[in-house]
Amino acid sequence: MTGWRTVDLVVTATIGVVFGVVFWAWGFVFSALTVGGLSPATYLVSGVWLIPAVLAPLLVRRPGAGILAEMVAAIVSALFGSAWGLDVVISGFLQGVGAELVFAATLYRSWRLPVALLAGAGAAIGEFAHDVVVWFPDYPAEFKVALAAWMIVSGMVLAGIGSWALMRAMLPTGVLDGLAAGREQSTS
């Protein structure tokens, strides 16, 4: 947590709390999509669960922001009564780690769209690593390959592009001026 300011913690935790409620509600959407049966394509919407792991680091630009935001979101979701119970906390941790590894690979110095895309994919790989072991261990290999593909596409589009676009949309408003993302924008 070296270099973290109070505002960084508050913003990261707030992202986590807000998305924890979103996660809980998104569980109902996901359940509705699986009424006719589960298919790998259903996971095209799973990227919503990965957004905090990408958005928080893009805004506060501190090591660990992706893990912290994703963990807070998972805990809030579990407290609200997630259909998956406390298991969402383990899943959230792995999703946060997946995104965090991408930002760490850039030494926390690149915040461009390609990095956000890769962070979304990294979070999806964390999601897949969890889900394939916990929920789909006996499914056929074809299902698992398709599942991984849909998760990665969703992570890249919804979490990667979505988080980057959200950050870019907030920059002109001045709401990010107190954060690293806003300070970088004002100097460029």
Image (cartoon, rainbow, N blue to C red):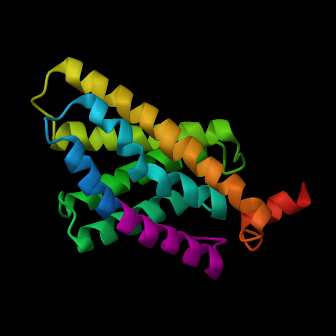
Q: What's drawn in magenta, residue-wise? A: 1-22
- Does residue 112 appear left or right of residue 90 in this picture? right
Q: Nearer the viewer, residue 31 or 138?
A: 31
Whole-percent x and y of residue 185?
83, 58
Q: Does residue 179 appear anywhere in the picture?
A: yes
Instruction: Work out which residue is located at the far right of the displayed protein and give it.
Output: 187
- Does residue 172 appear left or right of residue 140 in this picture? right
**Helix, strand or loop for the magenta stretch, by majority:** helix
Q: Is residue 114 above or below residue 88?
A: above
In the rendered image, residue 114 lying in the magenta stretch gets the answer no
> Quadrant of residue 7 in the image?
bottom right
Residue ID at (67%, 71%): 3
Instruction: Work out which residue is located at the far top of the displayed protein and give it.
Output: 142
- Does residue 179 appear left or right of residue 146 in this picture? right
Whole-percent x and y of residue 128?
31, 38
Whole-percent x and y of residue 15?
50, 68
- Does residue 53 appear left or right of residue 142 in this picture? right
Residue ID at (58%, 51%): 163
> Quadrant of residue 179 in the image?
bottom right
Instruction: Work out which residue is located at the far left of the displayed protein and give it.
Output: 138
User: Which quadrant is home to the N terminus?
Assistant: bottom right
